[in-house]
Amino acid sequence: MSFFAGLAKPSDFQKTASPVMVPFKSLIQVDRSLSTPVFVQVSDQLGQLIRRGTLVPGQRLPGSRQLATLLELNRQTIVAAYDEGMAQGWLESRSGSGTYVAAHFPEVRPQQLTPEENPHWNRPTISQPGYAFESTVFLQRPVLTQSAGLRLDDGLPDIRLAPMDELSRAYRSYFRWGNPQAHFGYGDTKGHPLLREQLSLHLNETRGLQTAPDNILITRGSIMGLHLTCQVLLRPGDIVVTGETTWAGATMNIQKTGALLKTVPVDQYGMDVDALAVLCQKNRVRMVFVNPHHHYPTTVTLRADRRLRLLQLAEHHGFAILEDDYDYDFHYLSRPILPLASADRQGMVVYVGSLTKSVAPAFRVGYVVAPSGLIDELARLRRIIDRQGDPMLEFAIGQLFKTGELKRHFRKALRTYHARRDYFFNLLTSELPNAIQFTKPDGGMAVWAAFNPVVDMEKLARQASFTGLYVASGQAHNPPGQQLNGTRLGFASSTEDELEQSVLILKKLLSEGSGR
Amino acid sequence: MSFFAGLAKPSDFQKTASPVMVPFKSLIQVDRSLSTPVFVQVSDQLGQLIRRGTLVPGQRLPGSRQLATLLELNRQTIVAAYDEGMAQGWLESRSGSGTYVAAHFPEVRPQQLTPEENPHWNRPTISQPGYAFESTVFLQRPVLTQSAGLRLDDGLPDIRLAPMDELSRAYRSYFRWGNPQAHFGYGDTKGHPLLREQLSLHLNETRGLQTAPDNILITRGSIMGLHLTCQVLLRPGDIVVTGETTWAGATMNIQKTGALLKTVPVDQYGMDVDALAVLCQKNRVRMVFVNPHHHYPTTVTLRADRRLRLLQLAEHHGFAILEDDYDYDFHYLSRPILPLASADRQGMVVYVGSLTKSVAPAFRVGYVVAPSGLIDELARLRRIIDRQGDPMLEFAIGQLFKTGELKRHFRKALRTYHARRDYFFNLLTSELPNAIQFTKPDGGMAVWAAFNPVVDMEKLARQASFTGLYVASGQAHNPPGQQLNGTRLGFASSTEDELEQSVLILKKLLSEGSGR
């Protein structure tokens, strides 16, 4: 920094405005080994000198020939660097008298330092708005995060199994295509045509649905499907029924519309449809939210007679069934149970699914299957939310369906999770026989575990986290007044070795009386 | 197909259930030159035979040794193929007696043919829902699409200029990173940390803002920023003011909340702030929506004294200013005009921007800049809409900010669009002097053109489309009762040659009296 020492202060420059006082040769360093063009290097460094105050507004710069000589560069390089500065607005040319630092540049000078220079970087400059707004109470729930260490999570996939190389290749092929106007302009709000077509085939083949692409809206995760459906079908005061308890993402979306939430019990055969029938006699029910395949959080499957009854009630009372089939691809019985939507002949079911659990959460691809008129309306609403999905992502997933890669991945993941479920079940049975009650789930990626009532789950979760194990307290799943003390213990994202370590940590904490 | 001719019908098979009657050697073809593993090929083709009815539920398959001999394959290959079928649930093993087509397979048989086989493919199977729902009238607007031919569009970027190779490389580097759990799990609802940090620096440097990453929410296009802000700040009955006319994406989002929309005139200096002041005396205004930089659709810039007055009114009356700065990066005066947000000291402004116009519409990256408390609330709402953005995309854009690629692209695009604006202005002046009125816009990507009142714009747009030229009728921009007859003619996405062809088509249609 010593060569700055004897320099005049910026205010002095402004008076004299003499270019020769600035030691350009020391201040501007060109490195030909960089991929950045030399004229860009010169122009960037001129910009920095202005931002730092070394060059000041209105100051005249050396002529291009003079600066070229000083820096031992071609004159055209300096001309190009000055052009850059003018295009960016911090240099200006005055006809006949050369190039100047723009007179009004101070208005665009940075008013915030870089992170390295500013100790208050993480403190927002404006922390309070001048206008009033209310926070919505029901949205204030803790965020679920995915830990990179040991975890018995909510039932997330093992991302290490996902076909990343194939996805990366599909992305690359999208970028390599010829006409950028056609591939990177506005696309179809309902989703990339390839994915809608492939998904339609996949759903018909694996789930017994009868869809055409017109029945499908590609969304960003199943939650967007729930959001759009609730916004379109529900009005303030409408009555919506869910099982007790159910997924917070659904209840928050129902509450957001101003609809009234009523619940019916869930037992080992799923939602109590008799209780629903009674409720329907006294109330005009608008929608029922249900996970027939694996109820969230308890993983139970809706029994066949109840499924039939639920559809009949919907037809009789005219309510919509919002079927959230978040983990259909992972079922371990020899005969998969088909979605309600596959038996729906009157169009009562809006079917929502996702690839989040089947590939990885970052690939935000979900879908809604519904009569085409509703799909059109959902898409109209979506236009004012985010306009459309990500065509690169939608193409890549569509491509992996087409080549069969994705189906192979599903089969591989199914086999792996099946083995992990069995291993985990045996572990829990042998290591924690008295501390928790659980059944072997027929499908999905988590075991629903009811802990001994003496265990303080909040405390247990906290103490587990000190040892590097993530486990949820399950607070969200235990309604006030009930003493379930249950939580979900996800087994799919961990190897057998990781599952064993995790269960042994839980065993140790419980035997030490932790969490009581 | 001839070898099918003499075969028994599926129903006959069911009775006899003898595996030897099926000509496996003809029906299963293995191609070793494919990358698909041989066992997968065999298993896929067995699945097809079942789906087609050649193999029927409950039918016994040949032993693995027998089928291996028939197909001249290794026995382990057949064992693996049968395992695949069992994992998929369409084969089952009965202990001691071999492998069978699953007895209950019919439940998952496809009920829909492939597109090639089904002439009704595009007709949805369920076209009417059994429950009632209302379509929202204000959402029924035509969709803007991006044409690949000649166009004078709404003001879209020329995607051919975008740094596609660099973006593709940044995507690839994201895929190549080590720990998939960390990169493809759930991410931050507010956006990828790299992009929030880089965007904060960029906004402070180019727009005179004073942001920290905590003040920034990454969204999917600016429309999501508008949507979230309207949903959080507005309640039914609130009064919101916009210019007359304004962007439909904003008015639809305001209407969606149940707020009441009031308008004030827009002249050549932007929104009439005096009219707003009068309106504020009689009404409790909750929010004002404005594009100070380039008003949409007319491209005028809000004059300095009006900007100051608008901020003062907001502070005095306590309303929020929703500043949509959709094309800030493209301004052609030597001195850019800073956003309202840069002069906002009381936190009255919610600033919304986008990279849609700066890179390409498919890269759905927008942002909201606001006090951190509002950013937190917007993120809580976003969790129930789509949970988070696309981390690959957000990382790639953040990376291109960091390397300087994006700034270089902005400068290149600015120079190109500047030249195109001048060229287009000269073309309109020389070729269509009497047919339209227009001024040279100081920035943005379109000219606002008021056509001679005798021109029927709907007809002109239709006739232009017959010649392969897209031009909007501008219907959406011309409120009933006014006789603007105006539309936006975008110049940025066309080369000079394309602009010339387009203007000559317009000239020919107008001189032939078309559109009258």
Image (spheres, coloured by chain):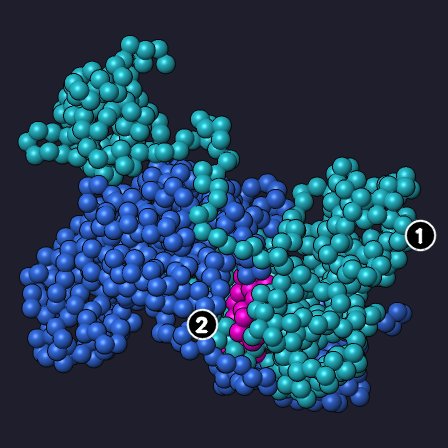
Chain colours: A blue, B cyan
First-in-chain label (2 vs 1):
2
Q: Is residue B228 magenta?
A: yes
Residue at the farthest right position: B434
Residue beneath disc 2: B380
Tell me where the magenta segment starts and ends, as one range.
B211-234
Q: Is residue A230 visible?
A: yes
Q: Is residue A266 above or below residue A6?
A: above
Quadrant assignment for the N terminus of chain B: top left
The one of A402 and A433 positioned closer to us in this rendering: A433
In the rendered structure, the residue with mark 1 lies on which chain? B
Residue A487 as seen in the image, left or right of residue B475: left
* Image location of residue A291, percent across then percent down: 31, 55
State the image quarter where residue A73 is shown: bottom right
Taking the image as drawn, is residue B37 in sight? Answer: no
What residue is shown with label 1? Answer: B434
The disc labelled 1 sits on which kind of residue? Asn
| Residue A252 higher or lower than A135, as above or below | above
Q: Residue at x 40, y 49 (%)?
A: A348
- Percent across and percent down for residue B200 are 56, 73
